[in-house]
Image: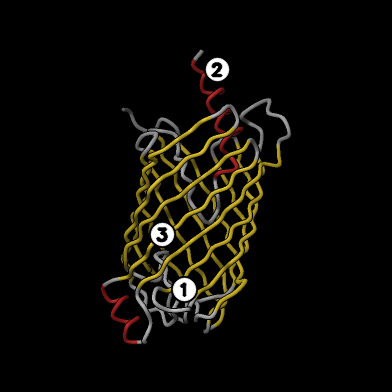
Amino acid sequence: MKKRLVFLLLLFVGKVEAQELFIFTEPASNMPARSIAIKQSGKIFNDASGSGTRHATELMIGANKNIMLHAAATYGRLNGTPFGLESLRAYGKYRFFSADGMYSHFRMAAFAEVAHSNTKPMYQELNLQGDHSGVQAGLVFTQLLHKLAISSTISYLAINGYSKTHQLAMGNTPEAVNYTLSVGRLIAPKKYTSYDQTNVNIYAELLGQTLTGTNKRYLDFAPGVQFIFNSKAKLNIAYRYNLQSNMTRMAPSSWMIGGEWLFLNAFKK
């Protein structure tokens, strides 16, 4: 009986929410309660000094059905610097609204994150994924319609500490508004018979930023594909490239590959 309940749970998660596991953004939905996931990703790009790499190791915790927590570290080699630790980051998300149907739902969540970085970026783009110290807070809205998921975020980002001092010294603004639009679709399997089946999802994400008080902005497009094995392990492959920008950036395009491992019922209530 217990094995059957686990099967039904994993089948439901895979069937209804698989295409919400976006590659570059977080949906309003959360991981299953009392679960833990480990995520490892790497980006390859060309910067001013040649080719660069950035890696991230992330621990994710589904505290309960409404609260999800992340802790991450980034490390890599860019702008000609030796390979090493770049930043530490903490993220929290609270789902405050949910309207569920048979094969659809709409959810809203609020999130906040804080990061500390050792890097010295020489460009106007702001981010907490390794480049700057700072805080970010925002809202995320996600609509699921059977095999199609649509999600959007809006957030405010402010850098601080050395990151802010360095940006101001270069004449750059230390604050920005970020916005995203993500679409995901489950393309395989056509029919579920077992949670051992491999899921295949395709994604298209728009990622944008506008520096406050200026006309500096960028807009990126990021198509990707995702494979989910046994409802527990993920493989992400994506390419992100610039559609429009009038600001200086670390890299106008990059490849990203990553894996994620989910552990259900990792801790008790």
Extreme residue toward the top, this view: 1
The CA span between labels 1 and 2 is 47 Å
First in residue order: circle 2 vs circle 3: 2
First in residue order: circle 3 vs circle 1: 1
Viewer-proximal residue, 209 or 47?
A: 209
Q: Position of residue 158 (x, y in %)?
A: 33, 68
- Assess disc 1: are there few (<14), some (14-19) or many (≥20) residues with their C-alpha within 10 Å of its C-alpha: some
Tell me which amino acid carries mark 2.
Arg
| Residue 16 placement: quadrant | top right
First in residue order: circle 1 vs circle 2: 2
- Which of discs 2 and 3 lies nearer the camera? The answer is 3
List the residue tagged with mark 3: 155
Viewer-proximal residue, 69 or 87?
A: 69
The quarter of the rendered structure image containing the C terminus is top left
Q: Position of residue 88 (x, y in %)?
A: 34, 61
List the residue tagged with mark 2: 4
Tell me which amino acid carries mark 1.
Arg
Q: Is residue 162 above or below residue 106?
A: below
Q: Position of residue 69 (x, y in %)?
A: 36, 46
Q: Are marks 1 and 2 in contact (CB under 8 Å)?
A: no
List the residue tagged with mark 1: 77
